């Protein structure tokens, strides 16, 4: 079949026709259990009646009004709701259309803050090697995956990358988790001192690393030490919660688990839950005030920022989460999923690490458990597992991140928050089958 779609099309992919709860159905009538929410997006599943009704109501009343002329009730309500849930000190919400836009806005806001705060020389960004922050040119510069950036050098933002906090591979055998977390965080201080802290605008990190690494949580105390270092050197802390935020880890904001407040935080994916294309950049009142009292406004904007239809959908997503008690459910079902994965795969010869928080779980595959040696990257095992899982009627998110300069294979599991225990059993069953079949093929 020929196609005019730029990218993967009907020749390579099934055509999705219908969604219901945790399931998607294709044009051939095949059913897929959505165990990854696409890319940790569909947190309410595919048929939330409250969100659908809210979108219809907003569509009837007002689909769009340009933010240069009007604010809207939907955008105002959404901002209020987000601030009610946000870490103390976060005070303003800038609504955008997705994650990359939110990260671009965060980087630009950090730059403008320092300019108006009398430190225009602060233009450099520090990020971590194990990270993904989006595909637009500024966000791409921030991301840690060298293969994504290479073709587009030189990139727009001067970014330096430090080691991530990655206990499975980087903690020394005789080192406590806390000591390792402290050591990993101190890499930021060393990099600041090397560059000259007065040249650095911000440090950006995902509180739980998603797409590049498969739900890597930080060691206890890592982010508290990062916060201390940022404060000491006048560097803004940007937390990218595009994938791990909005309840996914069992906290509305993933940073809650770390006990810190960022200066800027980005969210998307679960914010619209797949019902609308929306992201947001949130910042402290302090940043907002410096700019408001300086030039007067953030020099930014997109035609679709603050889109009423998207805002109404996101407001309804938050309402649905509250009315169904989904944050608490994520914690309970997350524990159930973790235990089921541990039971079924904890001793598997090719499962090196099971990790994550809430309904955000990662599985790292290794050729050899004892040495943690990865599979040959040319095999692209993570992609084979995804394909095999689709054949078993299961969607999981494959990731091939760089591990110590080599490709590693991870799979991300991030199902809708409404998933039942019985559906988790099916998920783990289908996943274990897909994993064994994919590995059998590469070992043949
Ligand atoms: N930041 C993180 C942590 C992400 O995981 C992603 C997408 O996967 C992005 C930013 C970019 O978001 P989007 O794809 O909506 O532009």
Image (cartoon, grey):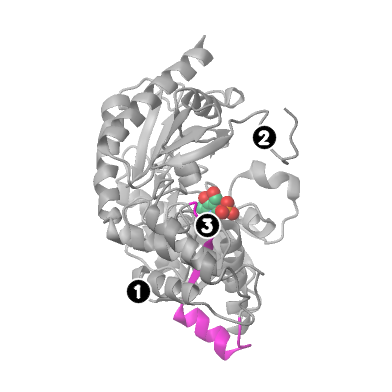
Q: CA distance from mark 1 to mark 3?
A: 27 Å
Q: Which label is found at residue 88?
A: 1
Question: Would you call the spot at circle 2 few (<14 residues within 10 Å), some (14-19), or many (20 or more)?
Answer: some
Q: Which is more toward the observer, 173 or 333?
A: 333
Q: Which secondary structure lies at badge 3?
A: loop
In the picture as drawn, the residue positioned furthest to the front comes out as 60
Q: Are marks 3 and 2 in contact (CB under 8 Å)?
A: no
Q: Earlier in the sequence, mark 1 or mark 2?
A: 2
Q: Which residue is mark 2?
A: 9
**Residue 98 place in picture, x, y as percent:** 57, 58
Instruction: Quickly name the residue at label 3.
Output: 276
| Front one among 5 and 338 | 5
* 1 or 3: tag closer to the N-terminus: 1
Quick one: label 1, few (<14), some, or many (20+) residues within 10 Å? few
Q: Is residue 355 above or below residue 107?
A: above
* Range covered by the magenta-colored residues: 274-297
Q: Alpha carbon of mark 3 to alpha carbon of mark 2: how far?
A: 22 Å
Mark 1 near ligand 1 (CB under 8 Å)?
no
The CA distance from mark 1 to mark 2 is 45 Å
Q: At which x and y percent is residue 236?
A: 51, 70
Q: Residue at x 74, y 35 (%)?
A: 3
The mark total stands at 3
């Amino acid at each position: 079949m020929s196609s005019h779609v730029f990218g993967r099309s009907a020749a390579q992919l099934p055509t999705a026709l219908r969604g219901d709860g945790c399931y998607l159905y294709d044009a051939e009538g095949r059913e897929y259990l959505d165990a990854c929410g696409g890319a940790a997006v569909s947190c309410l599943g595919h048929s939330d009646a409250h969100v659908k009704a809210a979108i219809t109501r907003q569509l009837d009343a007002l689909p769009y009004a340009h933010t240069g002329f009007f604010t809207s009730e939907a955008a105002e309500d959404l901002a209020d709701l987000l601030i009610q849930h946000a870490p103390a000190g976060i005070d303003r919400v800038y609504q955008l259309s997705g994650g990359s836009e939110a990260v671009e806005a965060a980087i630009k806001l950090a730059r403008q803050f320092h300019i108006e705060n009398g430190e225009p020389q602060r233009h450099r960004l520090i990020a971590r090697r194990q990270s993904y922050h989006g595909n637009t040119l500024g966000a791409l510069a921030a991301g840690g995956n060298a293969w994504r950036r290479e073709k587009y050098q030189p990139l727009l933002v001067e970014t330096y990358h430090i080691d991530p906090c990655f206990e499975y591979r980087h903690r020394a055998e005789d080192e406590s988790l806390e000591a390792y977390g402290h050591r990993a965080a101190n890499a930021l201080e060393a990099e600041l001192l090397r560059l000259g802290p007065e040249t650095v605008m911000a440090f950006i990190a995902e509180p739980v690393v998603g797409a590049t690494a498969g739900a890597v949580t930080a060691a206890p105390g890592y982010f508290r030490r990062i916060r201390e270092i940022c404060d000491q050197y006048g560097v803004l802390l940007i937390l990218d919660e595009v994938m791990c935020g909005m309840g996914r880890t069992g906290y509305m904001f993933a940073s809650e688990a770390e006990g810190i407040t960022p200066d800027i935080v980005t969210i998307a994916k679960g914010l619209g839950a797949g019902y609308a294309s929306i992201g947001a950049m949130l910042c402290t009142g302090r940043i907002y005030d410096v700019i408001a009292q300086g030039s007067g406004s953030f020099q930014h904007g997109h035609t679709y920022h603050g889109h009423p239809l998207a805002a109404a959908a996101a407001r309804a997503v938050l309402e649905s989460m509250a009315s169904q008690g989904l944050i608490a459910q994520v914690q309970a079902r997350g524990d159930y999923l973790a235990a089921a994965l541990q039971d079924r795969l904890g001793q598997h010869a090719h499962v090196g690490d099971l990790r994550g928080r809430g309904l955000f779980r990662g599985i790292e595959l290794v050729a050899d458990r004892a040495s943690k040696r990865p599979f040959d990257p040319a095999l692209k095992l993570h992609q084979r597992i995804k394909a095999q899982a689709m054949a078993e009627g299961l969607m999981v998110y494959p990731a091939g991140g760089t591990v110590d300069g080599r490709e590693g294979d991870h799979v991300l599991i991030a199902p809708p928050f409404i998933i039942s225990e019985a559906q988790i059993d099916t998920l783990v069953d289908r996943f274990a089958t897909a994993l064994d079949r994919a590995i059998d093929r590469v070992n043949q």
